[in-house]
Amino acid sequence: MNGRLVLAGAIAQLPSRGGHTWAFLQYLLGFRALGFEVLFLDRLTQEMDQRRGSHYLKAVMERFGLEDDYCLLGADRDVLGGIDRADALERTRDSLGLINVNGFLNDEEFLAAAPRRVYLDIDPGFAQMWRALGLHDSFAGHDVFVTVAEKIGRPGCRVPTCDIDWITTRPPVVLDLWPESAEAGEAFTTVGSWRGPFAPVDFEGTSFGLRAHEFRKLFELPELTGERFEVALDIDRADLSDLAQLDRYGWRLRNPHTAAGSPDEYQAFIQMSKAELMVAKNMYVETRGGWFSDRSACYLASGRPVIAEDTGLAGLYPLGDGLVPFHTLEDAVAGVEEVSSNYPRHARAAREIAESELRSDRVLETLVEKALR
């Protein structure tokens, strides 16, 4: 494959969040490995920490050989880093299209320049419900709509379609950059935010919540299993009761901005783990759309089993060895015990799932064919 592709997303707005950064790098580096010339568009407003954000993005782009392939937009047509605006616009005009992650880019000149505007939904449920409720329409101005909610439109999935013809995809992982790691650590780990940027959404009689609402169901897990759980968790000190419960039951908390604050640190944190405990946002659990974590894809590629809260994964991924779903605390306990008892088998299966289901070349080739051809 060849040609130009443009990806718009938010790295500079969230510096020192290595996992969030990798979510975009998988696309940029995956497309580049397929032979595409890539361009990354980011933006910062005047209210944001422009110095810190621009320095972080510059370091990431240089680290992966993308220093000539990004443009950091500021207010009033300013450019805060990377190539200049005119060059970025020309490359956008000459591209197959612009993939706008969660509708992040709202610069009308760039959107107008793109031959095709692809909305890539990686937080399914939120934007669809906002539009259905008349709160916000981030889909406006796009031509093609892609979501990681693979079961959207199917019976049992509660993510509104908004009368949109959705293309589905899954999180890619660049296997060459995520090799199988030989020596496993001792802890079940994960990286994430307690609440995240979105508020719960009340829709059709249900409150669709956040990761905190699911994590609270699992407070007793370390005590019940006797295993070590170490989580790089972005949790506010104001959540005193939750912090007290995590401490009471033996969760070991790491600061995500130091434990996984860069792409390299994030990768090292995953590869020093025994396995992942993937706790999903309540939105994903309740909507049953089949959302799967880009973070879990990295664990699997590293040969680290994933005990995953079920979001409707049946029929999408091979479940059992390497990828163990759970619904309840009791299921999670059983999953932890199963992985610990048969670890070599689960570790081998984890890598095999990444190779068969999530490898970037297959995922992204399919995405291009469906959304940009």
Image (cartoon, rainbow, N blue to C red):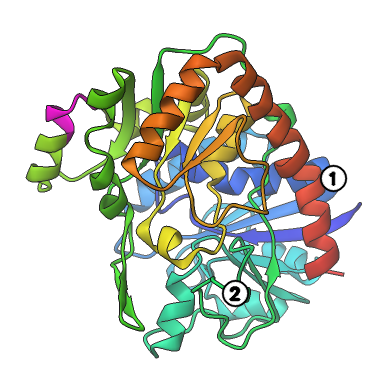
- Outermost residue, top direction? 183
User: Residue 143 lies in what quarter of the image?
Assistant: bottom right
The answer to whether any part of residue 250 appears in the image is yes
| Mark 2 residue element | loop
The answer to whether any part of residue 44 appears in the image is no
Tell me what residue is drawn at x 30 percent, y 37 percent: 233
Does residue 274 show up magenta in the picture? no
Q: Position of residue 361 (x, y in %)?
A: 81, 44
Name the mark nearer the viewer: 2 or 1: 2
Q: The C terminus is located in which quarter?
A: bottom right
Type of amino acid under label 1: Leu
User: Residue 227 lies in what quarter of the image?
Assistant: top left
Label 1 neighbour load within 10 Å: few <14, some 14-19, many 20+ = some
Q: Position of residue 168 (x, y in %)?
A: 69, 65
Tell me what residue is drawn at x 75 percent, y 34 percent: 355
Q: Which residue is mark 2?
A: 155
Q: Nearer the viewer, residue 84 or 32?
A: 32
Residue span colored magenta: 246-252
- Outermost residue, right direction? 1
Q: Which residue is mark 1?
A: 34
Type of amino acid under label 2: Pro
Q: Nearer the viewer, residue 150 or 37?
A: 150
Label 2 neighbour load within 10 Å: few <14, some 14-19, many 20+ = few
Q: Nearer the viewer, residue 368 or 51?
A: 368
Q: Nearer the viewer, residue 166 or 316?
A: 316
Image-based side of 50 in relation to 252, left or right: right
Does residue 249 show up magenta in the picture? yes
Q: Position of residue 334 (x, y in %)?
A: 41, 30
The correct choice, above or below, for 129 with respect to 85 in the image is below
Tell me what residue is drawn at x 67 percent, y 49 percent: 27
